[in-house]
Amino acid sequence: MERMLAALPSDDAPTGARSPRLVFVHGSGHAGAAAFPAQAAAFPSATFPVLAGYGDEAPAVGDVAASAQAIAMSSTDAEAVVGFSYGGVVAAMAACMEQPAALVLVEPALFQLARDRPATAGLIQRLEPIYLDATLTDATFERALMRALTGEDVGAAATADALRSSRRSRLHGAPWRHAVDPACLAETRMLVLTGGWNEEYEEVAAALVALGAEHAVLTGHGHRVVDHPDCSDRIRTFVAAG
């Protein structure tokens, strides 16, 4: 409980002129402000927490729930919570614990909301056996996951960073396994940004639109919509309109 209630470490952006007080929640790649280089420059007052299981902290079962609770507690005075990729799951879970003023979801991995749609159903069908395979190890899990996801063989994890990443992916579990209440999200002011490159993420966006979210497509950067030159302005405009 003490670990769950502790404040998350944060990579704060440099202080500067007045900007919206935003909390950015990273995905499963880069952590903290490193996941949002354009937004770290655009929003000097924003905070960029490092989620449980990242940074110097070893990954563990329960990290996702612990991170969601910490985000909920640390963003009660924020003008918006912004979640990217797997961080969209954490941000949505946090929003259902303590409703934020606004929620911005960038290519969120909220596949549980779209699991009855064809592309997402196919994705879950391909990946679920990987997450349930108890024979996979830190060395082999991410290799099997990427093979099922992309068809490419990235090889067994060998370096310390690769082993840690594979262990984190295995212990944090499938994003659709984390409960998010659609009724709760329907009561939250939301913007979803996608890149228009992937059917599954567009199906998730459609499910969020059905719950009342605004949706914009920013093409040309694949999954890394946060790198699109208009992304920060879209976030700023949405937050300011609240």
Image (tube, rainbow, N blue to C red):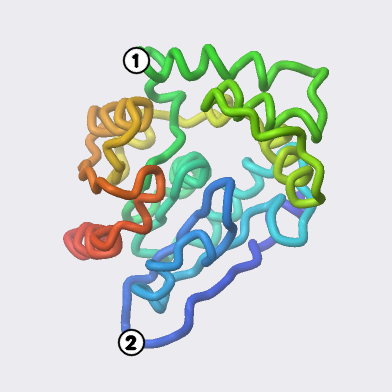
Q: What is the secondary structure assignment of the residue under circle 1?
A: loop
What type is the residue that disc 2 sits on?
Ala
Left or right: 149, with 46 as reference point? right
Give the class, few, some or many, for how many residues have Cα within 10 Å of label 1's Cα (few <14, many ≥20). some
Mark 2 crowdedness (10 Å alpha carbons): few <14, some 14-19, many ≥20: few
Q: Is residue 128 above or below residue 235?
A: above
Q: In the rendered image, which residue does mark 2 sit on?
A: 17
Image spot of residue 24 (x, y percent): 46, 59
Residue located 68% across and 52% down the image: 52
Find residue 16 and report its horizontal and vertical position in percent. 39, 87
194 up-or-down from 237: above or below:
above
Q: CA distance from mark 1 to mark 2?
A: 44 Å
**Position above or below: 216 against 141:** below
State the image coordinates of residue 60 (x, y, percent, origin top left). Answer: 77, 42
Task: Name the image quarter holding residue 111.
Answer: top left
The image quadrant where one finds the C terminus is bottom left
Q: Quadrant of residue 138?
A: top right
Residue at the left extreme, as displayed = 241
- Helix or strand or loop: what does disc 2 sit on? loop
The residue indicated by pointer 1 is 117
Q: Residue at x 40, y 65 (%)?
A: 22
